Amino acid sequence: MRDRDELALRSEAYADFLSDMNSSAIHTEYEVLHLMRQCTAQFGFSHFMIARLPAGEQQRFAERLVLSSWSSDIVREYDAAAVFPASQLIARLRRTKLPIFAETAVLMNAQGENAIDTIGTLFAGHAMRNAFAVLLHTTQGEAFAVLLSGPRTEPDRAETADLYLTLLQLFEILERTFETGASAREKLSAREIECLRWAAAGKSSDEIAIILGISVYTVSSYFKTATRKLDAVNRMQAIARAMRMKLI
């Protein structure tokens, strides 16, 4: 009886969440980020990530990441493992249109590799034991992986349908922000692009200041304005977006 009551409450909350979501008033990735956080919590998960599917085996995870609630440490460690293009997540999503539910470590581990213990420890330590994943496409056909992670159990058929529809609606809103963000290509200054390029190469703000012959304060100012122009939430996402736009 408790499970049935919990499901009824969750369905009611889901309906409230959708009714409160005014998609026409949402224009930025930051607003979509906020909605994704709400959706993730609403369905009992703790983390989410949205990433473009890799087009080749050499593409890094950080370069494909679009939006996530993962900490910078998780992104850095998973990126360093270099298993994303060959992960079971990508392989399984390419073979089905249906949602997938499995242990996060298994999905994010490279097939046939022995890195599962390391990756398992990484995600288990952040309460990301299980994952719900779907493959979604833009109207132009570009494929994206959407992953919700958390300690919860597998959703039943009705909740899976609710969750899939919610993610589909949120993804449609996110796609609209891509067009808004594209205008940043003409807005970034040469200095802002230089700072992003050196940061992508692993240089710190102090090192970039020395290389460009400017103050650390000025470097930070360039990062701040570039982040705003790229409609990113932090420096890491700004670098990732600049890479996807082929600005750096």
Image: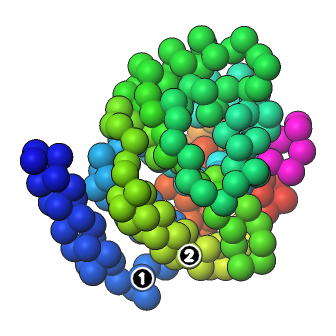
Q: Residue at x 73, y 33 (%)?
A: 87
Question: Which disc number belongs to residue 23?
Answer: 1
What crowding class fits label 1: few (fewer than 14 Cα within 10 Å), some (14-19), or many (20 or more)? some
Q: Position of residue 50 (x, y in %)?
A: 58, 53
Q: Quadrant of residue 151?
A: top left
Residue placed at 10% from the left, 45% from the top?
2
Badges 1 and 2: C-beta atoms under 8 Å apart?
yes
Compared to residue 199, the image places residue 157 above or below, namely below
Give amino acid for label 2. Answer: Glu
Q: Nearer the viewer, residue 182 or 173?
A: 173
Nearest to the observer: residue 46 or residue 71: 46
Viewer-closest of 189 and 24: 24
Between the C-alphas of marks 1 and 2, the distance is 9 Å
- Coordinates of residue 88 in the picture (x, y in percent): 71, 34
Tell me residue 131's x, y (percent): 49, 39
Q: Residue at x 83, y 41 (%)?
A: 59
Between 180 and 137, the residue placed more toward the observer is 137
Q: Is residue 36 above or below residue 215?
A: below
- Establish if 150 lies above or below 232: above
- Residue sitting at the far front: 1
- Circle 2 sits on which residue? 172
Q: Is residue 56 left or right of residue 146?
A: right
Q: Secondary structure at mark 2?
A: helix
Q: Is residue 110 left or right of residue 132?
A: right
Question: Mark 1 vs mark 2: which is more N-terminal?
Answer: 1
Q: Secondary structure at mark 1?
A: helix
Q: Which contiguous range is marked in magenta?
A: 54-59
Residue 210 vs residue 25: left or right?
right
As shown in the figure, which amino acid type bears the numbered disc 1? Ser
Residue drawn 89% across the image and 45% down it: 56
Q: Position of residue 75 (x, y in %)?
A: 59, 34
